[in-house]
């Protein structure tokens, strides 16, 4: 199964976008095991349309896939600096387990916000779907 990045989603270098926001939907969320790296940052609840969260029981952490009929609840964190972005890339296995892409999320107030999120690699998807 090949779940390449869909229309409207693309991998970008940091210099390609002004977005320094990050949408998280798993272990980086408030109260979860890896949220300590995002402590004390401004965030709010948000939704990623047209995606579905998959949580394989043997994996221990979720990933998202494109799904026209679903949405993923999570949080958007604001003003992420480049050092923290490198830390998040390391935690998420950017380039191997996940790819950092830019998506548009809706905040709980209905505002559209561009943010990075981590989209699974084909290797991860093929193993667990």
Image: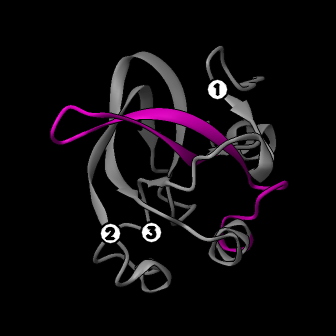
Q: Residues within 10 Å of mark 1 (few under 14, many from 20)?
A: some
Q: How many marks?
A: 3
Query: Would you say residue 32 sits in the magenta stretch?
Result: no
Res. 72 image quadrant: top left
Can you say which quadrant of the picture contains the C terminus?
top right
- Cα–Cα span, label 1 and label 3: 22 Å
- Cα–Cα span, label 1 and label 2: 24 Å
Q: Which residue is mark 1?
A: 9
Residue displayed at 75% across by 52% down? 14
Label 3 sits on a secondary structure element that is: loop
Residue displayed at 56% across by 48% down? 117
- Cα–Cα span, label 3 and label 2: 17 Å
Which x, y percent locates residue 98? 72, 51
Q: Nearer the viewer, residue 14 or 123?
A: 14
Which x, y percent locates residue 73? 29, 44
Label 2 sits on a secondary structure element that is: loop
Q: Which mark is residue 27?
A: 3
Q: Which residues are magenta?
A: 90-118
Mark 3 or 2: in front is 2
Which x, y percent locates residue 95? 84, 54
Label 1 sits on a secondary structure element that is: loop
Q: Nearer the viewer, residue 87 or 70?
A: 87
Q: Residues within 10 Å of mark 3 (few under 14, many from 20)?
A: some
Q: Which residue is mark 2?
A: 42
Can you say which quadrant of the picture contains the N terminus?
top right
Which x, y percent locates residue 18? 62, 46
């Amino acid at each position: 199964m090949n779940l390449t990045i869909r229309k409207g989603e693309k991998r970008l270098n940091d210099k390609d976008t002004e977005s320094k926001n990050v949408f998280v939907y798993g272990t980086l969320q408030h109260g979860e095991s890896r949220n300590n790296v995002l402590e004390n940052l401004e965030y709010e609840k948000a939704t990623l349309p047209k995606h579905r969260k998959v949580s394989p029981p043997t994996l221990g952490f979720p990933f998202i896939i494109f799904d026209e009929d679903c949405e993923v609840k999570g949080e958007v964190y604001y003003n992420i600096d480049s050092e923290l972005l490198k830390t998040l890339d390391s935690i998420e296995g950017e380039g191997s387990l996940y790819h950092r892409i830019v998506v548009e999320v809706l905040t709980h107030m209905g505002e559209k916000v561009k943010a990075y999120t981590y989209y699974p690699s084909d290797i991860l998807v093929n193993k667990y779907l």
